[in-house]
């Protein structure tokens, strides 16, 4: 069921989203060659707790850590570990925070040191595809409008669109209705209304968009092991369009 959030709920969602934004800003300087993904997870968890929130993902359906940290060909749900980041890697931090029962959710891909030109291409146009999708959001538009815009833009830059994974509603659960695919047809799917809160999150690849799940039953990687990038904001539908909740 798709829910419309009240002004009180939107204020709490905005606070949760701001904590997520601040966690990204806090953690960015630590994303360097030699740090382990487990260390990044620990730093982020401590920061989220210091803000009066709790990590949304820790314990969610059995997920073991505060962050999803996905490196190179890992699309989503990477487990923090003793793996050390290397120069030339790209790493996605998917961060969720729960504040007074309401969630914020935002993922961002970061470079480690100097990266290859094709990785810069992947990151630049995946991030831009997020904002292309957001531009479609306004009362009366459809979920399919968002996905169509992301898919069309991504393919124009020769990037693969992962179809099995999608955005979603956000509220008292970190994943709510509706699903928001990164592909679709204009004018299809649920109609957007003021007060709906959505996480829009294109997950694009440099190669094939086909994916597979690793033995831990969580981490999803590209089938051809091509690099993947992932950018996500939580937004609320407003009278004029949308407002980003996972920002300053």
Image: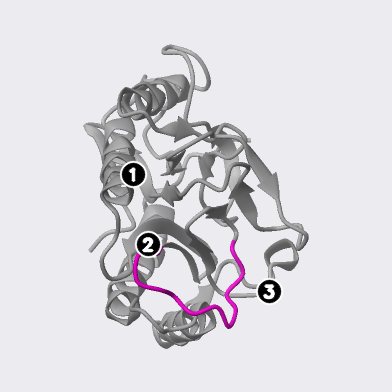
Sequence-wise, the earlier of marks 2 and 1 is: 2
Q: Between marks 3 and 2, how big is the CA–CA gap?
A: 22 Å
Please name the residue that numbered disc 1 is placed on. Answer: 122
Q: Which residues are magenta?
A: 78-89
- Residue in front for this viewpoint, 207 or 95: 207
Percent position of residue 34, x then y: 41, 84
What's the image's color scheme? one colour
* In the image, residue 83 lies in the stretch drawn in magenta: yes
- Residue in front for this viewpoint, 157 or 147: 157
Percent position of residue 137, x then y: 32, 30
Taking the image as shown, residue 177 lies to the left or right of residue 62, namely left
Q: Reply above or below: 228 against 90.
A: above
Percent position of residue 45, x then y: 49, 82
Q: Pointer 3: residues within 10 angstroms few (<14), some, or many (20+)?
A: few
Sequence-wise, the earlier of marks 3 and 1 is: 3
Q: Which mark is residue 64?
A: 3
Q: Pointer 2: residues within 10 angstroms few (<14), some, or many (20+)?
A: many
Q: Secondary structure at mark 1?
A: helix
Please name the residue that numbered disc 2 is placed on. Answer: 17
Q: Between marks 3 and 1, how big is the CA–CA gap?
A: 29 Å
Q: Secondary structure at mark 3?
A: loop
């Amino acid at each position: 069921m798709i829910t419309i959030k009240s002004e009180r709920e939107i204020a709490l969602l905005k606070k949760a989203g701001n904590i997520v934004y601040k966690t990204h800003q806090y953690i960015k300087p630590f994303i360097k060659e030699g740090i382990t993904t487990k260390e990044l997870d620990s730093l982020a968890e401590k920061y989220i707790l210091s803000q009066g929130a709790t990590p949304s993902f820790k314990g969610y359906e059995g997920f073991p850590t505060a962050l999803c940290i996905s490196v190179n060909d890992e699309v989503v749900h990477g487990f923090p570990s003793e793996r050390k980041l290397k120069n030339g890697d790209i790493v996605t931090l998917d961060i969720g925070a729960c504040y007074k029962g309401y969630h914020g959710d935002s993922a961002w891909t970061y470079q480690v040191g100097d990266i290859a030109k094709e990785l810069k291409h992947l990151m630049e146009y995946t991030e831009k595809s997020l904002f292309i999708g957001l531009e479609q959001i306004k009362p009366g538009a459809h979920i399919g409008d968002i996905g169509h815009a992301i898919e069309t833009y991504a393919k124009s830059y020769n990037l693969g669109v992962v179809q099995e994974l999608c955005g979603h509603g956000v509220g008292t659960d970190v994943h709510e209705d509706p699903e928001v695919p990164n592909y679709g047809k204009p004018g299809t799917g649920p109609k957007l209304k003021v007060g709906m809160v959505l996480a829009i999150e294109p997950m694009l690849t440099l190669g094939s968009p086909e994916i597979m799940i690793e033995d831990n039953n969580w981490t999803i990687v590209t089938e051809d092991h091509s690099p993947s990038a992932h950018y996500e904001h939580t937004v609320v539908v407003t009278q004029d369009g949308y407002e980003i909740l996972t920002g300053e």
